[in-house]
Image: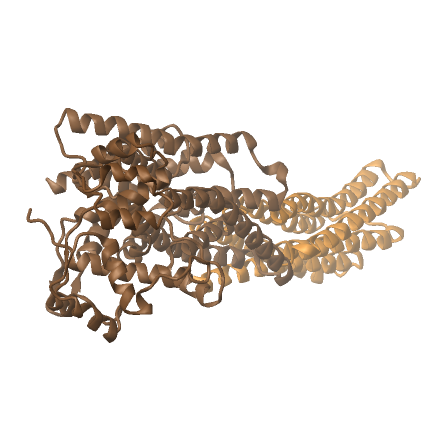
Chain colours: A orange, B brown
Amino acid sequence: MLKKTKKIELQIDEYLDMVLRGALIFKEGIKYYLSGQLDEFHQKLDEASRTESEGDNLRRVIETKLYINTLIPEHRGDVLGIIENSDKVLNTLEEVLSQFAVETPEILPELSQYFLELSDSAVSSVESMVQAVRAYFKNINEVRDHINKVMFFEKESDKIADKIKRMVFRMENLELSSKIHIRYFAFHIENIADSAEDVCDRLSIAAIKREL
Amino acid sequence: MIWFYLISGLFLGWTLGANDACNIFGTAVTTKMLRFRFAAILASTFIVIGAVISGGGTSHTISELGEVNALAGAFTVSLASGLTVFVFIKNGYPVSVSQSIVGSIVGWCIFTSTPVDIPSLTRIVITWIVNPFISGIFAYLIFKLIKHSLKKLNIHILEIDFYTRMALILVLIFGSYSLGANNIAKVIGVFINSNPFKDVNVLNIFTIPALNQLFMLGAFAMAVGIFTYSKRNIETVGGEIFTLSPVSALASVLASSIVLFLFSSESIEKLLHNLNLPALPLVPVSITQSMVGAIIGIGVAKGVTNLNFRILGKISVGWIITPIASAVVCFVLLFFVQNVFQAKIVVPISYELSEPVINEIKKTNAYTDSLSKYKFEVFHSQFEFRKSLNEIGIEKEEYLYSIFAIAKIENYLIDSNLAKQKLSPDNFTDEQIQNIKKYHGKYFTHKWQIVNEFSSISPGWRYLEDTPVNKYFNKFLKTRFEIIFDTFKIKESK
């Protein structure tokens, strides 16, 4: 029995590792794209797709096990919600990379730096989110600290994305279609941090419930 | 016929299984930590084991309270308690079976003019009040301790879930065992004096005593109650009062099981005595009361605002009404059983006020000079005796109880052969058995004569002054005298 429990614990940890790996792959992928190393970029995109589909499978296994063994009846709804929302984060990471591959937006060299910063900040928010989720399972007292970090990085991402949008729309020698295209990508990367924040909103309520 | 009468005891056992057992695993089932079937099977098994192995401890208190000496009487007492509890459960009141049975016995005493043992009754009523308090305090402490440790230990949520589940199973086993041990007295206690079973010898290896067989039967009735009716109760009663989390469910069940165990364990009593601590009385306590007390304790631990005072009020009212209602129901039923069905609800006992009896009464507070009016008279029923005593102004229940006990005529014949066969060296020293044998052929008509006679030969037979320290010795001596009375009583041929 305890062995079974430990196995599910391991699987949850493994799943969170995947979300984290997805974020790091994303960061690398963006770096390669911006520096024009497209072969490496496509390699990262493949990795991201694999991680995403592996994550999906593992998530289903965990959810089924929680239900079949009627584990944590009191917190099951919360845990499933948290895991599903984390999955959205992983999906978004993969989606954004694949949009880069499909649409090949032309990011001007003067914007590269800001895009790198934006992806760094979004990825940091995902990293903190993963830590927060781990803390929810194992160390409830630390959940709050990690959630605060996620909030911070989400705000940072907002600010950087905003800056990019302002810069783009003030450029004179650029077609409106290009401007909209670039804005669209800033918006998508920003979305990653937003979905990490969604997980944390759910998490903070779940953590309060656990403390009662 | 005996078996027919036992049916009402079994009915009471059924209500007990339906009402009380679900207190032990109800919260585990409503919090979805255990499946009903699994919990029910486990609980039933350990109720039977508990009843058979250590059901002896508390049975005596209840049979002392009122010696319901006729089967039809015992039948009615059980029926009245069972009916009262059933009506309350059906209406969603978590009541206490121990209260209802005490109420019924008092009803029987009133109907048959048998004086009630007021000190015994008081002791039982006090536990009704003390029990929820102790449970509440235990639950509060256990809950705080668990919460605090969980905060410190940083255990994975799934492991907490696992350990809580395991602990709930352990407590379920422990609680069912205590429930069986503690409550079997309520189911079958009134039938002890008319036990239809005989000792059974299994292949000359061991014997199953008649009493244990009776207990096992009662425990089976409880198990049937669990399977047939407690599921409904868990959903209506358990769900309505409070919604507990798995951890608080564990704390509450653990606390009430500990309390149940404290009030039923003879070894704990001995331990407390050896540590020079005042012993808890061994009385049948109610798991419902422990559980409600424990839940209040957890409510307080989580903040008093969580408590639902309206429902608590309803429960308290139920607790006050139950014993009274049972007494009334029992009284009415006895009237019907006696007058409509012409059944014998009480065996008449003879009393005499001979000179030695009056001298013995003089040693108690119950004596008044007017007793001499009946000097040398013999009375042939409880009713007649009580009426005569009332006529000369003795009305206080406590005095009546003492006079009844002293004047009761019973026949004892000391037989050294019986002494050799029946008195086990576990309970008596060699010297004591020799003492007893010296009286071979001697005839006694009152219990107190035997006590006086024996205490005159050796200090080991003398009761000590009634202080908390001596309580255990006195109790031990009393049980030894009970064995002697049991052994040498001349049984009337049936």
Instruction: Give the side of residue B467 with respect to residue B1, left or right.
Output: right
Q: Residue furthest left?
A: B493
Q: Position of residue B1 (x, y in %)?
A: 10, 39
Q: Position of residue B282 (x, y in %)?
A: 38, 53
B220, A166: nearer the viewer = B220
| Image position of B166 with respect to A100: above or below | below
Which quadrant of the view contains residue B431? bottom left
How many numbered markers are drawn? 0
Identify which residue, A79 or A112, lies in the foreground. A79
Q: On the rendered structure, is A106 left or right of A202?
A: right
Q: Position of residue A65 (x, y in %)?
A: 46, 53
Asked if one can make out residue B229 in the rendered structure from this viewpoint, the answer is no
Q: Is there any visible trace of residue A5 in the rendered image?
A: yes
Q: Is residue A40 above or below residue B333?
A: below
Q: Nearer the viewer, residue B260 or A47?
A: B260
Residue A68, horizontal then vertical, whole percent: 42, 50
- Nearer to the camera, A133 or B342: B342
User: In the picture provided, is B310 more to the left or to the right than B233?
Assistant: right
Res B401 quadrant in image: top left
- Say which quadrant the N terminus of chain A sits in: bottom left
In the image, what residue occupies the spot 83% across and 40% down?
A179
